[in-house]
Amino acid sequence: MKGLTIFERRQNILRLLAEQPGLRVGDMATYFDVSEGTIRNDLNALEEDNRLRRVRGGAVLVSPAGLLTFTGNGQPTVTTEADSKERIARWAAETIEDGDTILLDASSTVQFMIPYLKSFERLTIVTNGLVTARQVARTTDHPVVLIGGVVSRAGNATTSLLGLDIMETLHVRTAYVSGVGFALQTGLTERNIEEAQLKRALVAHIPRLVALVDASKIGAVGAVPFLANDQISHLFTDSGVEPEFIEQMRQARVNLTVCGENTVRSFRVDGDTPTFTIGFANESETLPFAVDVRRSLERAAVDAGNVDLVVADNQLSGEKALEVADRLIQRQIDLAIEYQIDYKAGNLIMDKFQQAG
């Protein structure tokens, strides 16, 4: 999009962020055909005007009650806990594999996964979300299967069971879902019967069910349950959860990943096998090779079944790596793996871990 004035470009940035939560600096630079530095200057100026808030890699919109997204009829609605939802969505997207057919529900939390779908090949996206379908179609090359039905009053999704027959023709590997609340006694819940009935029917024959639930919804209970604890393959949440919840999830035998601002910790369930905690400080999540290293370690942890993995990003900074080392020591990990090219920082980090015993 060339030829825009600074004002026009910044207004379009706000529009894009409303339509595509989680859009990254690089994506915006490509869209507007300007440098990433120019986009960062735009974001900084808009942040000074209190129009948005900078987050790692991009920005999110600001409003007094939360963050603005748009429903299918173009009317704004509030999306709260956007930072937490973005982190949850980012790490949930790591469970996708090339060639997958996946189901995305119409929730705002799951919508935050959309920017990460571009890094995969040969995906097929199934959804009942009108906004979700439009965003995927606009920002990726993946085919989208939209489940038919009655359009919700908000205009952002289809409800009812009218379009359910199409699921019989598809082999969906994983469903990514959220709800208005999650409690150990009830599982995931929704506020109305039609939406809960559709979600329950959609996931009925999908082998892997991944729940994305920010901490503000933990303990909340909607009117209608649709996904019990023992059906959930993996639950992703943020670091706002209480330690008691983590232990309760372990006792309930639900795999859990807690996504913090600086570290990500996975708690996996595997019978009575002793559990080991491994801390992995990655060189940088912006480097493809470093990401591959981290993914390999995550796959190994899954295969082992008895490893709690704490992942952190050194951000190509020796100073940051020292901060990460302190956090890993506080977590009382059993083993630290440090991916660091700054040898001076590496020596200091080694001393820290040796002193910690």
Image (spheres, rainbow, N blue to C red):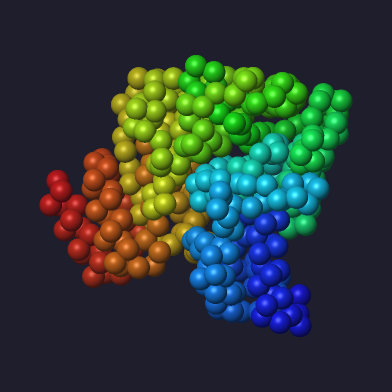
- Residue 247 against residue 313 in the figure, above or below: above
Q: Is residue 118 left or right of residue 85?
A: right
Tell me the quarter of the image containing the N terminus. Answer: bottom right
Q: Could you tell me residue 232's position as x and y percent? A: 56, 26
Report the residue that reaches farthest toward the front: 64
The residue under the point 70% across, 39% down is 106
Q: Is residue 30 left or right of residue 169?
A: left
Q: How many marks?
A: 0
- Say which of 277 and 40 sits in front: 40
Q: Could you tell me residue 28's position as x and y percent? A: 65, 68
Q: Is residue 355 left or right of residue 341?
A: left
Q: Is residue 350 left or right of residue 306?
A: left
Residue 303 shows in the view: no
The residue under the point 27% across, 43% down is 331
- Say which of 21 and 252 sits in front: 21
The residue under the point 24% across, 53% down is 326
Residue 312 shows in the view: yes
Q: Could you tell me residue 78's position as x and y percent? A: 63, 47
Q: Could you tell me residue 185's position as x and y percent? A: 50, 16
- Residue 184 against residue 18 in the figure, above or below: above
Residue 244 picture quarter: top left
Residue 170 picture quarter: top right
The residue under the point 50% across, 23% down is 183
